[in-house]
Image (cartoon, helix red, strand yellow):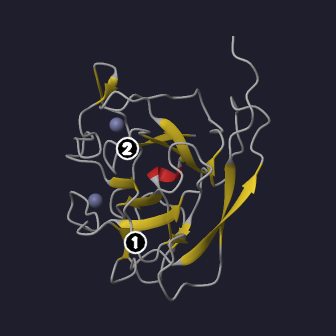
Amino acid sequence: MRGVQAALPAYAIEVGTEPLDRPMRNSVGGWAFLADGQEWPECFCGERMALFFQFDIPFQVEHFGGDHLLVFHCRAHNDAAEPQLSGGRLVPRYWDAPQPPYPRPFWRVLLQRHAVLPAAEAEPSVRAVPLMLQPFTDTPEAEGPGAGFFKVGGTPSWAQDPEYYTCACGADLVYVCQVPEGMEFAVHPGLPEQPYSVGADTYNLFLANEVYLLACPAHCDPAAVWPVNQN
Ligand SMILES: [Zn+2]
Ligand SMILES: [Zn+2]
């Protein structure tokens, strides 16, 4: 029997409207803050992945406070993520492992302490706007389910049954951030359309599924994050 736990720290993520003209750490699109020597992620198809959003995780969020979260996804590949398991854990180096029918994942999520340098050039497709984080009370109990909007911390809203995964390193992944179903990211005009996306001038993540980012609390690798997709 578990007692009633206090609500976990949670922050609603609000998307600004004023276009960014300089690097900001909390942004949709914009200048990716990467570690020294870290390359901008590329998809197996050769396309540079689009930076959908990035932000600094508030210090109050357990395990990940102070980390910088970046979510990249290929424009040309739009699909749902399917967990590949081995011996009850996600497969070794699951962030680079085959994602049938693809030879590698078509996304990259990074969660890292050392994200000090803004890329020289901004993300070219997704329109750059700021993100603002506002604390809110997600649920009175830590078990949830939590609110269904764009947020960090709190508890997942789970459109279907909860999903839990164990990292290849042996640590149980912990929920950190949620992207709501159908969330659209505005792109600059004249770009190639994303397959299966709703609007010609927007891209989405994982076929516009609701996305729950589960990350390794042991920080065994900056890419040790699994994107659960549900709808
Ligand atoms: Zn691709
Ligand atoms: Zn791990």
Check disc 1 and report its element: helix, strand or loop. loop
- Image quadrant occupied by the N terminus: top right
Of discs 2 and 1, which sits in the foreground?
2
Residue 9 horizontal side relative to residue 56, left or right:
right
Check disc 2 and report its element: helix, strand or loop. loop
- The relative height of residue 127 versus residue 6 in the rendered view (above or below) is below
At a point 39% along the width and 30% down the height, the residue shown is 171
- The relative height of residue 170 versus residue 174 in the rendered view (above or below) is above
- The residue pinned by badge 1 equals 32
- Image quadrant occupied by the C terminus: top right
- The relative height of residue 181 versus residue 185 in the rendered view (above or below) is above
- The residue pinned by badge 2 equals 219
Seen from the viewer's position, the closer of residues 203 and 95 is: 95
Amino acid at dot 1: Ala
Q: Which mark is residue 82?
A: none
The crowding category of the residue bearing disc 2, from other C-alpha atoms within 10 Å (few below 14, some 14 to 19, many at least 20), is some
Residue sitting at the far bottom: 21
At a point 19% along the width and 46% down the height, the residue shown is 103
Q: Earlier in the sequence, mark 2 or mark 1?
A: 1
Q: Quadrant of residue 216?
A: top left
The crowding category of the residue bearing disc 1, from other C-alpha atoms within 10 Å (few below 14, some 14 to 19, many at least 20), is many
Tell me where residue 50 appears, x and y as whole percent. 38, 68
Seen from the viewer's position, the closer of residues 67 and 196 is: 67
At a point 30% along the width and 31% down the height, the residue shown is 168
- The relative height of residue 229 versus residue 189 in the rendered view (above or below) is above
Report if the beta carbon of the residue with label 2 is closer than 8 angstroms to ligand 2.
yes
| CA distance for labels 2 and 1 | 20 Å
Q: Quadrant of residue 72?
A: bottom left
Count of numbered circles in the view: 2
